[in-house]
Image: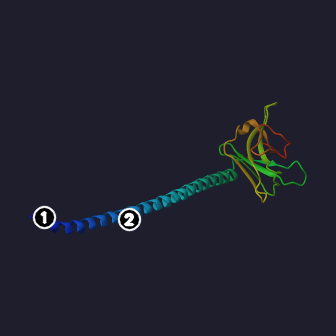
Amino acid sequence: MNTVRAEAGAPARTKTSFWIWAGVAALLVLSVYTGWQAERLRRELAQLQGRSATVAQERTKLAKELADAERIAAILSDPASVQVSMPQLQKGAPAMRAYWHARLGIVVAGVRIPAPAGDRTLELWLLSKEPGRKPIPAGVLRPQADGKFVLLVSEPPAPMQDAKALAITEEPAGGSEQPTSAPRWVGAIG
């Protein structure tokens, strides 16, 4: 009797084990597909995060440019700003003009300003009223390709009442601690 039961159970096991193996194979295929999809989604997420970081940096840059433009407009339009004419010391070159607001800072602007040679830059200096004191560096900028020059100094390194003049020299890229060339533009304050 036991023999008959074992024989009758054999086909059932074969059928069961076929479905178990089919299920295992389906789970394996599903696992591989899910892993592939997860990796694809991870790559897409990394790309989106990279784009998001780029957009955030661009947004921060634009916000700073907007704040600077608003500050420049405020300095240029405020009657409390002191205007300083800065003629070019070489004949035939365009003049610049500075606007110094005691609270908002300094704007130096000019048009058709020739760019210094190579990687040199233009540097703004505050010339002290105090005899013997060295010029104080206040900012560097190269004119744009079209000759437009707008330098904003949000926090001047000395108060207006301590300066007798502004000067601009041509300096190595990044500026210098002390002028290395003769001033190209100079303007007396007040």
Disc number placed over residue 3 in the picture, else none: 1
Residue 86 got which mark? none
Quadrant the N terminus occupies: bottom left
Against 38, residue 164 (above or below) is: above
Q: Mark 2 sits on what residue?
A: 29
Helix, strand, or loop for circle 1? Answer: helix
Q: Percent x, y for residue 30?
A: 37, 64
What amino acid type is highlighted by mark number 1? Thr
Gap between marks 1 and 2 measured at Cα: 39 Å
Residue found 36% across the figure and 62% down from its top: 28
Give the image location of residue 140, x and y in percent.
74, 46
Report the residue that reaches farthest toward the right.
Answer: 91
Specify the quadrant of the image occupied by residue 18. Answer: bottom left
Q: Is residue 99 visible?
A: yes
Which of the two discs, 1 and 2, sits closer to the camera? 1
Q: Residues within 10 Å of mark 1 (few under 14, many from 20)?
A: few
Q: Residues within 10 Å of mark 2 (few under 14, many from 20)?
A: few
Question: In screen coordinates, is 45 left or right of 18?
Answer: right
Q: Is residue 132 above or below residue 172?
A: above
